[in-house]
Each structure stands twice: as structure tokens, then as C-alpha cells.
Amino acid sequence: MEVHNIDSIREEILTRRKERGWSQKQLAMKAGVSVNTIFLLEKKGNDIYLDTLLKILTALGMRLDITLPPMPVYKRSVFRY
């Protein structure tokens, strides 16, 4: 699944958790995070650290691939002294 923002990731986490029949507590235990972290993530209550997000995704059997837009090409300046 391709997502483009954190809200899409939140929704996918909630969907995957419910598909597995897991409570928030069960996901929290499997991910090694607090229940409050799962609650706030699903309720859009706060931002989330990348390492925490990766723990949750891993517990759900998901992975995160990040594709960055290409960097603009700048001409290299040569300075002579």
C-alpha cells in the first residue's frame, strides 16, 4: 500500500490491528510501546517519533519505504584564490 501522509499511515495501522483482532493493549505489548502511544496514534492525538512508528509497523508485519523526490542539481562553484 502506498501512503502519502501520516493520517493514511494511522488509518492503515488501525485497520491492520482490527483485522488481526488485536486490542490496543495487545499491539502495544507486541510493539514494546505504551497503550497510550497506540491510543494517541490512532486518534490523531499527537505526532509520533520514527523509531516508535517503526516498532508498531514491525509488530503488524508492515514496513516503511521512503522515497524522496530527486534533489535538484546545482552547478558546482569553483573558487580560485
Image (cartoon, helix red, strand yellow):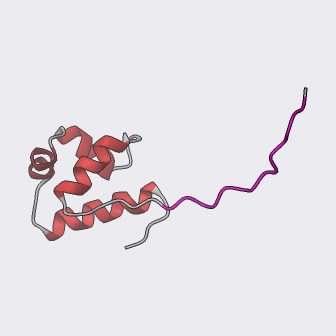
Horizontally, is 11 left or right of 15 in the view?
right
Query: Residue at (29%, 42%) from the top-left corner?
Result: 52
In which quarter of the view is residue 7 placed?
A: bottom left
Span highlighted in magenta in the image: 67-80
In which quarter of the view is residue 33 placed?
A: top left
Is residue 14 or residue 9 the one in the foreground? 9
* Extreme-right residue of the structure: 81
> Which quadrant would the N terminus be assigned to in this image?
bottom left
Horizontally, is 1 left or right of 26 in the view?
right
Query: Residue at (14%, 41%) from the top-left corner?
Result: 32
Is residue 50 or residue 25 the one in the foreground? 50
Query: Residue 31 appears at what percent x and percent y?
Result: 16, 47
> Which quadrant would the C terminus be assigned to in this image?
top right
Query: Residue at (34%, 62%) from the top-left corner?
Result: 11
* Extreme-front residue of the structure: 81
Query: Residue 5 appears at what percent x and percent y?
Result: 48, 59
